């Protein structure tokens, strides 16, 4: 029986993936095999000794201590693409709000309460201050062409925009889904220099932090409109404030409020609603649960942020999985140990991801004795599991 700890409220459609015959799911178990969560921060949480996997029902994993999990042989999953349509729809909303100042107009209209019969005349007199350009025919730059970025690019093109995208790590899957009409930039500077609107769809890490700063802002058109539905730290708030004051930036739309941006003029601040749809929550919960189930029961890894994707159909009665460091001689040490025990390896799959690696081996017959202990004793091995 596997124990699953929930650290947030998870959609029932996801929890239904855990068979009651094989799983016990609760928000109180102390030493779970798996954790499923959304935004709960695990950084101050002691990692249970029995914990084998963490699944984030969402794309961002900033709330999970990735390095600590890797060192303990804990696989961290996320659910890329499960909330992509929800975020895309909000980005398109933000694109329109950045242009038409609908938010400012709504707030102003509420000040007319009590004006009675004068309201129509006041509306006609005051509406001019909220005028804004149409997006049709304007140029949109999409930085990051993952699941969300591709959908945003295609949708904006269908709305009549001229779209240019940049992503040095464009995957084959994303390329297949990207409209042929989307231009591909050779670098980010090309996007910054040529676009009327810029939308960010990249993860927050050391290389992307403050990617919108005084230097990159100088490259942009006067009156550029910037959308950030990825992470607040991608934009240097102090440099943005100066650019807004100098009218370099006409509007900034973000889904990540903080004290700095809330006090700025010409901003549309949305309270992190990107994935806040029932469909998105259900999709993310189902994908996260399926990832946990397949890993705990079969050892297969899909959509992990710290270990390589690795899948193999089951062969034989016993499967041994080994999370280990990506260093030389590991496979030869594993094979030698099985040969010593006269165990036949029916199938072996090995994948690596930067410093981490993962090996799946299906064995002819059962194992006995100290083989699991000896595998764990190999320098660089992080975790060994025997699945029957």
Image (cartoon, rainbow, N blue to C red):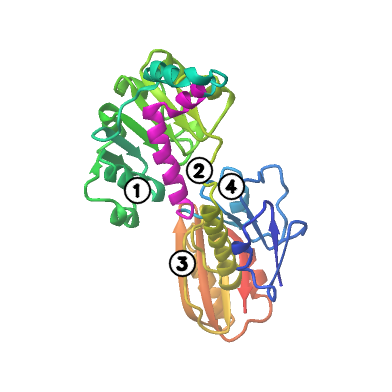
Q: Is 43 one of the magenta-colored residues?
A: no
Badge 3 marks a residue whose secondary structure is strand
Badge 1 marks a residue whose secondary structure is helix
| Mark earlier in primary sequence (2, 3) | 2
Q: Which residue is mark 3?
A: 350
Rendered-image quadrant of the C terminus = bottom right
- Viewer-nearest of labels 4 and 2? 2
x and y, in percent, of residue 331 in the image: 49, 68
Q: Which residue is mark 4?
A: 67
- Nearest the viewer among 125 and 325 is 125
The residue furthest front is 117
| Mark earlier in primary sequence (1, 4) | 4
Q: In the rendered image, is residue 133 in sight?
A: yes
Q: Residues within 10 Å of mark 2 (few under 14, many from 20)?
A: many
**33 left or right of 130 in image:** right
x and y, in percent, of residue 112 in the image: 52, 20
Q: Residues within 10 Å of mark 3 (few under 14, many from 20)?
A: some
Q: Give the CA separation, mark 3 to mark 4.
A: 21 Å
Q: Give the CA separation, mark 1 to mark 3.
A: 31 Å
């Amino acid at each position: 029986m596997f124990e699953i700890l929930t650290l947030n409220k998870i959609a029932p459609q996801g929890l239904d993936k855990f068979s009651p015959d094989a799983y016990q799911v609760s928000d109180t178990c102390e030493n779970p095999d798996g954790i499923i969560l959304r935004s709960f921060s695990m950084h101050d949480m002691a990692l249970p000794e029995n914990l084998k996997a963490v699944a984030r029902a969402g794309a961002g994993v900033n709330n999970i201590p990735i390095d600590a999990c890797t060192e303990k042989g804990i696989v961290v999953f996320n659910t890329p693409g499960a909330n992509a349509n929800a975020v895309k729809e909000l980005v398109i909303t933000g694109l329109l709000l950045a242009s038409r100042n609908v938010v400012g107009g709504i707030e102003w209209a509420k000040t007319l309460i009590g004006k009675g019969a004068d309201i129509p005349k006041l509306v006609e007199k005051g509406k001019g201050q909220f005028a804004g350009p149409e997006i049709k025919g304007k140029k949109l730059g999409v930085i990051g062409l993952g699941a969300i970025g591709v959908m945003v690019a295609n949708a904006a093109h269908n709305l009549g925009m001229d779209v240019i995208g940049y992503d040095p790590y464009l995957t084959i899957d994303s390329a297949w889904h990207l409209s042929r009409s989307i231009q591909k930039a050779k670098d980010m500077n090309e996007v910054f220099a040529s676009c009327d609107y810029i939308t960010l769809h990249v993860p927050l890490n050391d290389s992307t932090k403050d990617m919108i700063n005084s230097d990159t802002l100088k490259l942009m058109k006067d009156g550029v409109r910037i959308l950030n539905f990825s992470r607040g730290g991608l934009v240097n708030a102090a440099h943005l404030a100066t650019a807004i004051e100098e009218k370099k930036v006409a509007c900034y739309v973000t889904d990540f409020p903080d004290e700095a941006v809330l006090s700025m003029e010409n901003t549309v601040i949305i309270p992190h609603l990107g994935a806040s749809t029932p469909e998105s929550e259900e999709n993310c919960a189902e994908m996260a649960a399926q990832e946990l189930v397949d890993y705990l029961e079969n050892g297969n890894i899909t959509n992990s942020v710290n270990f390589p994707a690795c899948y193999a159909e089951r062969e034989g009665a016993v499967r041994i999985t080994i999370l280990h460091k990506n260093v030389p001689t590991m496979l030869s040490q594993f094979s030698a140990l099985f040969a010593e025990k006269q165990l036949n390896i029916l199938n072996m799959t090995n994948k690596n991801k930067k410093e981490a690696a993962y090996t799946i081996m299906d064995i002819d017959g059962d194992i006995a004795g100290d083989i699991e202990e000896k595998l764990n004793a190999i320098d660089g091995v992080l975790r060994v599991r025997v699945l029957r």
